[in-house]
Amino acid sequence: MTFAYVLPDIRDLLSNPLYLVMFAFQLWMTVDAARRQEWLWVVFNFLFGLSSILYFFMVYRPARAMEGSGAGFEWPGAADRERIRELEEAIHHLDKAHHHAALGDIYAGQGKWDKAHECYEKALERDDEDLDILASFGKCLIQMQQPEKAISMLEKVCRENADHDYGQSTMALGHACLSSGRISEAQAALEKVLKKHNYAQAKVQLAEIYLKADRQAEAIAHLQEVMDDDKHAPSFARKRDALWTQQAKAMLRSHQPK
């Protein structure tokens, strides 16, 4: 008898447009909370519709405002598509290097490395001295498994500006050298980065080098720093460094004293 009463109610709800809209909103807020690693909100948003409304005003709106994205609803990728249209129009009329590079940055952010490569190549044809273009192209080449080409670009950037992009270009150079088996050069680049910055990637990759050189104590110290930093990092930083934190955790586990 109980099911006979429950099933019609469910059918009524599913046929109610207002319910479907509220369910979609609740799901949207739950997914957003998970993306931001706000796990308590994930649970409450999933279980209670009212919680998703509170989350929208207490977390989502302020976070979007700080990100410079506004607070209204926006379909995934809408901002990128609009920016791509703007850049394509600018390229059609002006054909400037920085327009091609900006378009490449969008595609790189989407993981579309072939398209990003094409844009950076066109940008470099128009200005082969721009350090930002060279650095972005170099990072793209790393992702495309072409570290030797990346090294030549990134070395030029780092020669002219040793701390370009707050050390991230030097870190990319270290990554490229490591991928090419040029271990001593990779070590020098990564150690240079860590003298001024605190990047999880640099610590994990340098720890990898130290472990191969039988410098286990130094390697473990770097890996432990990554884990300690993760405990106190804001959610956006934890998300950005998640891959390196997971790698640090795995490396620590495999090198624990027996």
Image (cartoon, grey):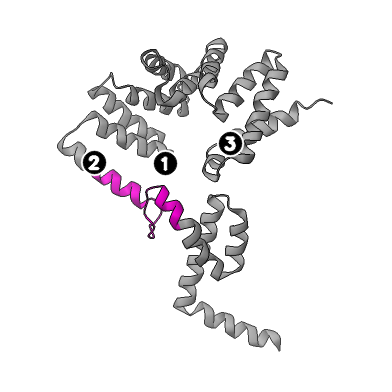
Residue 217 sits inside the magenta stretch: no
Q: Position of residue 234 (x, y in %)?
A: 55, 43
Secondary structure under the numbered disc 1 in the rendered image? loop
Q: How far apart are marks 1 and 3 (CA)?
A: 17 Å
- Residue lying at the far top of the rendered structure: 184
- Quarter of the image for the N terminus: give it: bottom right
State the extent of the magenta-drawn residues as a range.
61-86
Give, as a three-letter code, the residue at label 1. Answer: Gln
Q: Position of residue 136 (x, y in %)?
A: 38, 27
Q: Looking at the image, is 70 positioned above or below residue 109?
A: below
Seen from the viewer's position, the closer of residues 205 and 232 is 232
Residue at 64% across, 21% down? 208
Residue at 62% across, 35% down? 229
Seen from the viewer's position, the closer of residues 168 and 107 is 168
Q: Distance between the residues labelled 3 and 2?
A: 33 Å
Which residue is tagged 3? 243
Q: How crowded is mark 3: few (under 14 residues within 10 Å), some or many (20 or more)?
A: few
Front disc: 1 or 3: 3
- Residue lying at the far right of the rendered structure: 258
167 lies left or right of 101? right
Which residue is tagged 2? 88
Q: Where is residue 175 in the image (x, y as percent from the top left)?
A: 51, 22
Q: Residue 152 carries which label?
A: none
Q: Mark 3 or mark 2, which has the lower sequence index?
A: 2
Front disc: 3 or 2: 3
Seen from the viewer's position, the closer of residues 202 and 63 is 63
Q: Where is residue 161 in the image (x, y as percent from the top left)?
A: 38, 17
Which residue is tagged 1? 110
Q: Looking at the image, is 201 positioned above or below residue 60?
A: above
* Quarter location, residue 210: top right
* Quarter location, residue 152: top left
- Quarter of the image for the C terminus: give it: top right
